[in-house]
């Protein structure tokens, strides 16, 4: 939810790190912010497990699709003389991306739960 709000409130931060091959970066950033908000709201609603699973799958796919932008941001920062946000920011961010994918699926119930016993 926070990431979605940030995309809408401060889109320029995200536009700056968007790879050059992404068409219409301003519009893409706004659309992804709205998608993140919609996904978060769908995960939070308790009435439809099907909607929660769909939101989890969509957010997981989204997290996978933005990984190239994370790599692009990392490369941009490392090319700067001051290294921008630096390794202390980028390495955990990139290492945690698979965890975000898993978390979206797990929190939505899209992953089957193992029975203990």
Image (cartoon, helix red, strand yellow):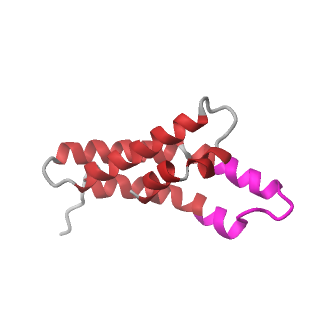
Quarter in which the C terminus is drawn:
bottom left
Farthest-out residue, left? 47
Q: Quick check: 71 left or right of 26?
A: right
Quick check: is 21 in the magenta stretch?
no
Count of numbered tags = 0
Name the residue at 34% across, 44% down: 57
In the rendered image, which quarter is residue 18 located in? top right
Q: Position of residue 54 (x, y in %)?
A: 28, 41
In the image, residue 47 sits, relative to residue 99, either above or below, namely: above
Q: Residue 71 magenta-drawn? A: yes
> What residue occupies the far front of the structure in this picture?
9
Would residue 95 be found to the left or right of residue 49 on screen?
A: right
Residue drawn at x 66%, y 49% as measured from the top left: 71
Which residue range is magenta in the image?
70-92
Report the front residue among 68 and 73. Answer: 73
What residue is at 65 percent from the left and 62 percent from the top?
A: 90
x and y, in percent, of residue 53 in the image: 26, 46
- The residue drawn where x is 53% and y is 35% is 27
> What secondary structure do most residues of the magenta stretch adopt?
helix
**What percent of the width, then of the height, locates residue 38?**
33, 45
Determine if residue 59 is in view: yes
117, 61: nearer the viewer:
61
């Amino acid at each position: 939810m926070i990431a979605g709000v940030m995309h809408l409130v401060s889109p320029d931060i995200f536009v700056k790190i968007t790879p050059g091959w992404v068409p219409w970066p301003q519009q893409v950033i706004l659309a992804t912010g709205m998608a993140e908000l919609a996904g978060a709201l769908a995960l939070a609603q308790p009435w439809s497990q099907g909607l929660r699973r769909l939101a989890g799958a969509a957010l997981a796919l989204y997290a996978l699709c933005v990984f190239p932008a994370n790599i692009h941001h990392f490369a941009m920062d490392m090319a700067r003389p001051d290294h921008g946000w630096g390794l202390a920011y980028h390495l955990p961010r990139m290492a945690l991306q698979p965890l975000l994918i898993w978390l979206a699926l797990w929190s939505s119930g899209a992953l089957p739960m193992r029975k203990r016993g």
